[in-house]
Amino acid sequence: MQNRIEITEATLKEDRLILTVQSDEQIQKAKASGQMLVDSDHFAFVYILETEESFTYLILGEHTWAPLKEAMNREIPVYLAAEEQTLELIQLHQELNYLIDNIKDNANYGDMEEKVKSTFL
């Protein structure tokens, strides 16, 4: 995966989860796609951001999973933030639920299956 953005911090607020990245430049022209993938080799969920020229992969590593689960349980939106920019990650809950259901009891995901079960199920 080329154009990757790593989350530096995940902060739960009363009404939202804020996923922080290092700089505005990383998300300035990005739009939320509402689509996700799994990177089972690196134990991460990947939210796809779109720009005019390409896709950027927002990496939701294990350090974000507990806050993501809490946001899902509380049904609060998830936002990507950097300095002055914010972007709502639309359909993240639905996509994550779909992926978790696919990973559950599916040995094709290797060790990620157990990690997902222990955090989300």
Image (cartoon, rainbow, N blue to C red):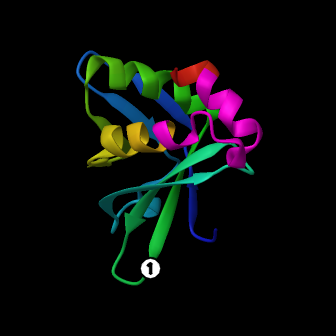
Query: Looking at the rendering, in which quadrant would you find the N terminus?
Result: bottom right
Q: Quadrant of residue 18?
A: top left
Q: Which residues are magenta?
A: 101-117
Q: Element type at marker 1? A: loop
118 to the left or right of 79: right
Residue 35, visible in the rendered structure: yes
**Relative depth, front residue between 22 and 59:** 59
Q: Is residue 35 above or below residue 93?
A: below
Identify the main secondary structure in magenta. helix
Q: Residue 23, how many percent across, how many down?
A: 48, 53
Q: Residue 5, how many percent across, how many down?
A: 55, 56
Q: Is residue 6 above or below residue 117?
A: below
- Asked if the stretch drawn in magenta spans residue 71, the answer is no
Residue shown at the point (40%, 59%) measured from the top left: 27
Q: Residue 98, how many percent across, how many down?
A: 40, 43
Q: Quadrant of residue 7?
A: top right
Residue that protrudes farthest toward the bottom in the picture: 53
Residue shown at the point (32%, 36%) measured from the top left: 78
- What residue is shown with label 1? 54
Residue shown at the point (61%, 30%) measured from the top left: 116
Residue shown at the point (33%, 81%) measured from the top left: 52
- Asked if the stretch drawn in magenta spans residue 105, the answer is yes
4 to the left or right of 67: right
The kind of residue on which mark 1 rests is Ser
**Relative depth, front residue between 85 and 100:** 100
Q: Residue 70, how many percent across, how many down?
A: 40, 18
Residue 79, visible in the rendered structure: no
Q: Quadrant of residue 29?
A: bottom left
Q: Is residue 69 above or below residue 113?
A: above
